[in-house]
Amino acid sequence: MDRNPFHHGTLAAIRSLGRMGVEVHAVLEGPHGPAAQSKYLSSCGHWDPAPTAAESFLRTMLSAADRIGGNPVLLPMDDITAIYTAQHAQDLSPRFRISNPAGELPAQLADKHALATICAHLGVAHPDTHVAETQDDLRFAERAYGFPMMAKWARPWLAAGARGLRSTTLLQSHDQLSALAARAPEQDSELLLQRYIPPTRDADWFFHGYFREDSTCDFAGSGRKERAYPPAAGITTLGRWLPNPEIDHTARTLAKSLRYAGILDMDFRFDIRDGKYYLLDFNPRVGAQFRLFGDSNRIDVIRAAYLDLTGQVSNFGSPQYGRTYLVENYDLLRKLARKPSGNGRRRPGWLSSLRRADELAWYARDDVKPFTGMVKQTFLRAMRACTPTIERMP
């Protein structure tokens, strides 16, 4: 329900299952988006209109079940879909195979305030967090955390439609903090202020996994964020699969403690000052870069979930440590946004990094149309942003 035509994770899921010979149906933001052009997509649905988002979700899912037939596997691709799937599990489970836990757990994990509380209760390292409700709260955060400081919307899916607001913002000054806090009353989400963990080399990591109904981890991988956009607090544009026993243990133990089932995506940052990995996010759904973790038998979290939910045996291969995954459009934006190096050293060319990547998010020789669709939509958006509107013209 996150209407983002550039969500490469959705395309990756379509391709991963489609290449297995699975009939893939998706509900997308529209029939002309890049992912909708994939040859591996059997049908593309749309969101049914309804008074509320929850009603729209349920109507759309039940209509899709009628259209597809059988007992299809339901795989949420964004936070709000994962939340609604859990909350409406009683209505959906007779029609779909569902891996996500029922009830409110996904909503609690996606809520960054609730996640901070869960981490404190279970002893999981998490950045100090304070809810900004009053001027006293702002003053407390300034004294306790200083600048730079992280600001996050507790429930980012509720603030996503607000113009000019990002789910996460790195604040550099009192004026920036005051300006953001002034917009908080307009939102249906709490504004959280968080102690900033400064990035250091090789500090950002993530964990993707699929957990069975009994919270046993069926398939998982840990990866390092090599590049991101925006650089300070953005999505992975280049990731590398590497072993990290500490993150692996923390993630598996936390999921077991919560009795979590289904696919998950966690983000961590290492703090060189105290030698700890801090959990930044717990996404109760597929992570956009999940295809980084494709083992020697091409199993990933999507395939592991599908095979488990359909009662098939997963023929797991060996981890492909060192494997890389690059997101072309966002990595290009990162390159364009970077300041020139002042040390006189020549950085490796961007095109050469494309060639070295083991897998690209958009370009695939066997499925080119989504890539061309992404390029076209990117160009059209850039043109709209650069071209004055009629109202601005004299």
Image (cartoon, helix red, strand yellow):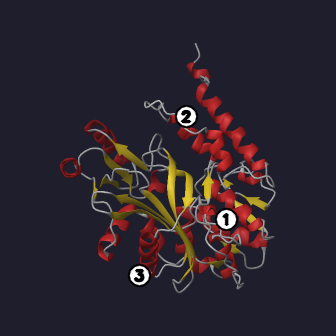
Quarter holding the C terminus is top right
Residue type at mark 1? Thr
Residue type at mark 3? Ser
Residue type at mark 2? Leu
Camera-side mark, 1 or 2: 2
Q: What distance separates the C-alpha of mark 1 from that of mark 3?
A: 33 Å
Element at badge 3? helix
Q: Residue at x 70, y 80 (%)?
A: 315
Mark 2: few/some/many CA within 10 Å (<14, 14-19, 20+) = few
Q: Earlier in the sequence, mark 1 or mark 2?
A: 1
Q: Earlier in the sequence, mark 1 or mark 3?
A: 1
Mark 1: few/some/many CA within 10 Å (<14, 14-19, 20+) = some
Percent coordinates x, y for residue 61 in the rendering: 67, 68
Residue that extends furthest to the top in the rendered view of this protein: 394
Could you tell whether 146 is left or right of 261 in the image? left
Could you tell whether 250 is left or right of 352 in the image? left
Camera-side mark, 3 or 2: 2
Between 338 and 301, the one nearer to me in the picture: 338
Q: What distance separates the C-alpha of mark 1 from that of mark 2?
A: 39 Å
Q: Which residue is mark 2?
A: 336
Vertical comparison of 147 with 94: above or below:
above
Q: Which residue is mark 1?
A: 60
Q: Which residue is mark 3?
A: 257
Camera-side mark, 1 or 3: 3
